[in-house]
Amino acid sequence: MNQPSTSTDPATPEVLAWLAAQTARGCTRPSLFKSMLDAGWQATTAACIMQLTPDEKAAFGGLPTPPRVASALPFASLDASGTMVDAGDKWVQVITHRQAPELMVFASLLSPAECDALIDVARPRLSRSLTVDTKTGGQELHPDRTSQGMFFARSENPVVQRIETRIAKLLNWPVQNGEGLQVLRYPPGAQYRPHYDYFDPREPGTPAILKRGGQRLATLIMYLLEPQAGGATVFPDIDVRVAPVRGNAVFFSYAQAHPDSRTLHGGEPVTAGEKWIATKWLRQGEFV
């Protein structure tokens, strides 16, 4: 393959275009890195331009591997193209990415078979969905939420375990810091009016809730079955609307448990067919 030339300003448009072109041709990341070294690039400079992950730095050689530092929030590490994320057992495409708040829509995070498996196991265990009661620390029926739902225990079966492992890699967050997967069914007319997922620190029941793993920091909503009409996930504060496409998922994080996080969101009413989703909430610490 042609090799990029070095320059005073390394991340030039020409170099970035070269990387994109070689990636489109199917060149592997190790070969791209080696090609840059062969052309005279310093290893640290090439690594910076390619945005190598710590694992890639260790695998490619010639680079010090810094210790992993825990992030304050779950996040997805984009590749050099800015469109793909390594989820361990597969690469996942990012089709929407916004900041303030951090929000990503992933394409085909789950396979059709995985969607079907979750629905099949969840269906006989559904009951009217509850909401967290931050005044008491318990749960309650709420008119804003009209779906049916159930929770899987962590690693309850091989499919759940595989998905949880994938999410942990995708979002750089430990499996044990996630609540069990919640599966929800929205029949025609069902909805979830706009709300926040964090626990309001001003409410008297919040301290009891936080004993189970700390504050919620992020949400991943995975679409298992798309309705014939309706059912979009909406974010009123940032004017974002995510269509419920089977296998896709929307991720968003909230650095503060406050409306300033701009993570107000809801599920529009289903007007035809059914919508099924699986939700994963990520906590500060180990969820017990």
Image: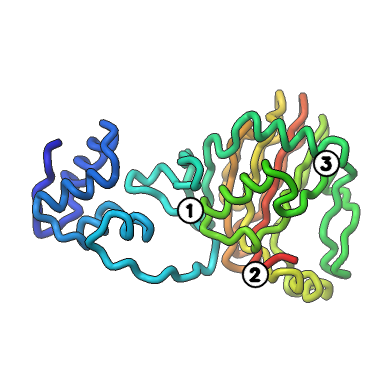
Report the residue at 56% width, 50% height from top. Answer: 238
Q: What residue lies at 83% left-to-right and 41% top-to-bottom?
A: 147
Please give the residue where the numbered disc 1 appears in the rendered image: 76
Circle nearer the viewer, 1 or 3: 1
Marks 1 and 2, the one that precedes in the sequence? 1
Q: What residue type is labelled 1?
A: Ala
Tell me the amino acid under the disc marked 3. Ser
Does residue 245 appear anywhere in the picture? no
Disc tally is: 3
Q: Which residue is drawn at 53% across and 42% down?
A: 105
Q: Name the residue under label 2.
A: 285
The spot of residue 3 in percent (x, y) is: 12, 43
Nearer to us in this view, 147 or 78: 78
Q: Is mark 1 on a helix, strand or loop?
A: loop
Mark 1: few/some/many CA within 10 Å (<14, 14-19, 20+): many
Q: In this view, does 238 lie above or below 243?
A: below
Tell me if label 2 and label 3 are in contact, CB under 8 Å. Answer: no
* Mark closer to the observer (2, 3): 2
